[in-house]
Amino acid sequence: MTTDYLIIGAGPAGLQLAALLERDGRDYLVLEAGSAPGTFFTTYPRHRQLISINKVWTGSEDPEFNLRADWNSLLTDDPALLFGNYSRRYFPDADTMVRYLADVAVRTGARIRYDTRVSRVSRDADGFTVVAGGETLTARRVVVATGVGNLYVPPIPGAEVAERYDTVSVDPDDFTNQRVLIVGKGNSAFETADALVETAAVIHVAGPRAVKMAWQTHYVGHLRAVNNNFLDTYQLKSQNAVLDGTVERISRREDGGYRIDFRYARTVEALRQIDYDRVILCTGFRFDASIFDDTARPRLVINDRFPEQTPAFESVNVPGLYFAGTLTQQRDFKKSTSGFIHGFRYGVRALHRILGERYHDTPWPSVAVEATPEAIADAVIARINRTSALWQQFGVLADVVTVTADGARYLEELPVAHVGSDGLAFLVTLEYGPEHDRVDPFDITVPRIAENDAAAAHDASYLHPVVRVRRDGAVVTEHHLAENLENHWDLPAVHHQPLAQFIKGVLADGV
């Protein structure tokens, strides 16, 4: 069997791409190792509460705007497939996600082969050969949407004797009156710690780097408030602690417990030995590249955790090998939202449009706009006040207004790094200020610029629109729109008029 596209993985990204390909009548097949879509969510998160928000009531009837507060829905034209129809909980249960994805697969008509695990991917001049489920398939292109399913085990001597986040018991009673060390400082570590607060005698969470709070960095993969109750028990001296430093060695004691060699990061104290009853590794995940032979093995980066990709989500060294979903966070690692459904759903849609341009002569969707400052400003203002894609993929996706002697066209949601280099273009993004992660939002002694201060808009720390002008690929000037408390960038004198005046000056220099 030969197909245009083989998609490996029927999680949210694989389903999102399949739904778009199915809608457009493309030739594709999804291969899924599990017996149903979204099997990742049958196991993770281990304590079953998602950290992706599900805000059903926003005060708006605009479905595009409402996706700003809906981090779980995939992008379809079917209103029945909004996640809010499945749960009203702000942080839903993971089992609800499993049920939702199963319905997406059925209602979109996605062509999926279940219980079909891919064991080998190779490539030659004609395309890819994929061995899966005892069958050999060929494809012109392969899209990997498997996520990062392998637990990352750090190179700590003795790490192999520790328990692991993916298999450790989730019954708090199994830890009654025990001393527990959790290695890692991300959401999985603190999720685990929070679950044990009521039963464990002592809990230490350890890692070499400082804890980063998502509410300050604006990166939702950093520690979320829903998982940080443990910090309260630490700061109020409840026999729990966060240790800054490195675990140098993990050893088993004769009585079945563990002895840890630990080196503090903040002191000159010598190596300290600490005893525990349990040690749990919660150190993140990585991409499993073992299915690729030498002819198709993608180059890996970021400590070999992710495949390296071009701005088109294609492997930098294997032509025709594309990636979708959380794997694409290599492009914006710990900066934006490509590691999460509410980010990568737009990345998948962008990938679908890139594939359409490259292989099906389908131009990027666009609409004509009158090439006047007022008309362009009107179009930009209308979009930034409702777009969910630019809101969720801040700094990563851009709307683009191209201007030629024949007029202007408005294109939505291009990856910034993928934007072409010819002629005059306005790139519209939503972005935080360059030092936004250094601003403590709860420290009222730190001054910030006033709301709706157009003159100081370029100094804004909070999310706000930025319009950059490119001529033949080079950024020549930019304009920032002023912050607004409720993200309404539509005040005539504050937002619209300064933007129109800026555009007028650009157009005056000629196309």
Image: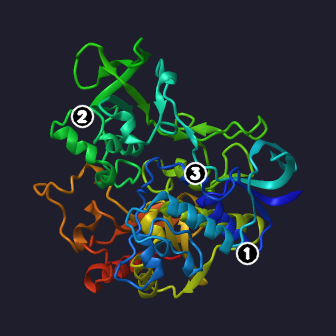
Disc 2 residue type?
Answer: Asn
Disc 3 residue type?
Answer: Phe
Residue 24, labelled with which disc? Answer: 1
Residue 161, labelled with which disc? Answer: none
Position of residue 225 relative to residue 235, above or below, is below
Residue 456 is left or right of residue 106, and the answer is left
Q: Residue sitting at 81 percent across and 61 percent down?
A: 4
| Residue 74, quarter of picture | bottom right
Q: Residue sitting at 52 percent across and 72 percent down?
A: 400
**Towards the viewer: 385 or 32:** 32
The reply to whether dot 1 and dot 3 touch (C-beta < 8 Å) is no
Instruction: State which tag comes first along the sequence, 2 or 3.
Output: 3
Q: Residues within 10 Å of mark 2 (few under 14, many from 20)?
A: many
Tell me the element at label 1. loop
Give percent across and percent down for residue 75.
57, 72
Mark-to-mark CA distance, 1 and 2: 55 Å
Q: Residues within 10 Å of mark 1 (few under 14, many from 20)?
A: few
Residue 291 is left or right of residue 163, and the answer is right
Position of residue 63 relative to residue 468, above or below, is below
Quarter of the image that includes the N terminus: bottom right
Residue 33 is left or right of residue 423, and the answer is right
Disc 1 residue type?
Answer: Asp
Instruction: State which tag comes first along the sequence, 1 or 3.
Output: 1
Mark-to-mark CA distance, 1 and 3: 27 Å
The reply to whether dot 2 and dot 3 touch (C-beta < 8 Å) is no
Tell me the element at label 3. helix
- In the picture of the structure, the residue carrying the numbered disc 2 is 240
Position of residue 352 relative to residue 367, above or below, is above
Q: For the residues carrying marks 1 and 2, which lies nearer the camera in this image?
A: 2
Q: For the residues carrying marks 1 and 3, which lies nearer the camera in this image?
A: 3
Residue 40, labelled with which disc? Answer: 3
